[in-house]
Image: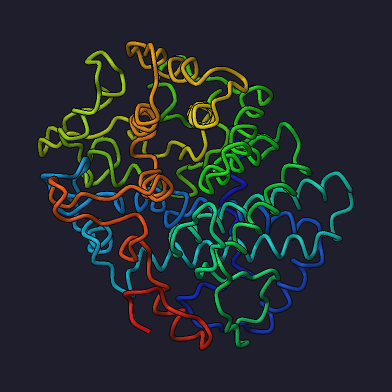
Amino acid sequence: MKSYKYILFILFTTLLVSCEKELEIDPKQNQDADVTLSTETGITNILNGAYALAADADVYGGRSLVAGDLMAQTGLTSTTDFRWRGTYADFRQMYTKTIVVDNVFARQIYARNYEIINAANTVIENIDKVADPDKRTRMVAEANFLKGLAYFDLVRFFALPYEAGKQNTQLGVIIRPNAIYDFTADLSKERSSVEEVYTLILQYLNDAYDGLPEENSFYADKYAAKALLARVYLQQQNYPAARDAANEVIENSGRALSTTYANAFNHDENQIEDIFAIQITKQTGENEIVVMYASEGNGGRGGDIEIRGTYLNKFTDPDDARANFNYVNDDNGRLLTSKYTNQYGNVGIIRLAEMYLIRAETNFRLNTAVGDTALNDINLIRTRANAENFTALTLATILRERELELAMEGFAIHDLKRTKASIDVNGDGSELIPYDDPALVFPIPLREMDTNNKITQNPGYGS
């Protein structure tokens, strides 16, 4: 399997021009682009390039996950579970909720996701160059999966949260349904509503599910699409749909929980628990989440994010492997997670444990037992972690179990928003940042605002 990874560093440089660079295409480059779009090999390389863009450090190669963690923390070490100790001002702004409109990491998350979308659109619009009909179907489905993944992160980071039972007319993000070939054209456009963006995400992922095979090496397969659907439905609080999607993945995907909690992390090739993972090699770049979370000896910066006692105190069983899955960096004494110690290991995006947690939560909320009872699913997760089993459950217990199992994997801010929780700034309830506070939403990047005369900025960031 590892040999296939080297495909992923073929970048889509012919057609995608970074928003940070001026468009200067000479005649030879124009000709190369025409050749790329006219051959099956060219279209295949563009799809591989879309995966490579997803693996970029700015998005699913790590920083999107780190941003999801830091946005749910506060700048006060007395109340936060994880303390930001790094020197990157852009991450510190997320940690302290003082984000400015030209925050580099927010800008790059925005730009890279739209580059993924543009590459995927290009594949779909030129798929007629692919001769085999089965390959065409699969490639279109993979492109739709990547578009669904990108739009989902965009709308969660750059828009106020989706709320069940409401019309969700609040501004979401720009929908770009077609590939952009001429970056000199006026691309001004207003953002679509959150509801419209979620509708499109569901369409893309359902289309992906219909067209993807059950097995597809380390690329997205049918169950990666269904698992991402389960995540999207959960974010929408569509509990029946989330339950059924998670159950299908558990029952039919062929995945299983790793034998130990430690075995779910730090591997070079996909393991039995992986549903979708970003492939990282020495050729494609560093695992950026390792860079932020690990010691120098493990490929990191010394532990820009350290674990605090407020997090460890949430564990009720001292034998819980998850409570002890950490180490002290001898260079600075910081307590660091052991989830990220392989500098060139894969970045896990979706693993099976999440599906069990979704099925448990939704079954509990709906008073159903599709696939199994909520208690059995939670205890299965706890047994794997060598934690004492529960005899009864509450919703708070299930949500806490999700927090303990998936900590430092990029879920924190998105779970806070969907459960309508608040950040307790001082630890005593005197100052709360509610789930729908604009401070928990990224600004539309300054570069987009400067070049798009139709777009509206998010509240709190000026015009």
Which quadrant would residue 382 be assigned to in this image? Answer: top left
Looking at the picture, tell me which residue is in the foreground, 276 or 438: 438
Looking at the picture, tell me which residue is in the foreground, 273 or 68: 68
Rendered-image quadrant of the C terminus: bottom left
In this orientation, does residue 236 appear?
A: yes
Q: Along the horizontal axis of the image, is 227 left or right of 298?
A: right
Looking at the picture, tell me which residue is in the foreground, 389 or 208: 389
Residue 451 place in picture, x, y as percent: 49, 86
Which quadrant would residue 226 be assigned to in this image? Answer: top right
User: On screen, 78 above or below 461?
Assistant: above
Q: Along the horizontal axis of the image, is 225 left or right of 280?
A: right
User: On screen, 218 above or below 436?
Assistant: above
Rendered-image quadrant of the N terminus: top right
Give me the residue at 34% from left, 39% from top: 408
Residue 119 place in picture, x, y as percent: 65, 63
Instruction: Count the marks.
Output: 0
Which quadrant would residue 315 be assigned to in this image? Answer: top left
Residue 337 place in picture, x, y as percent: 27, 33
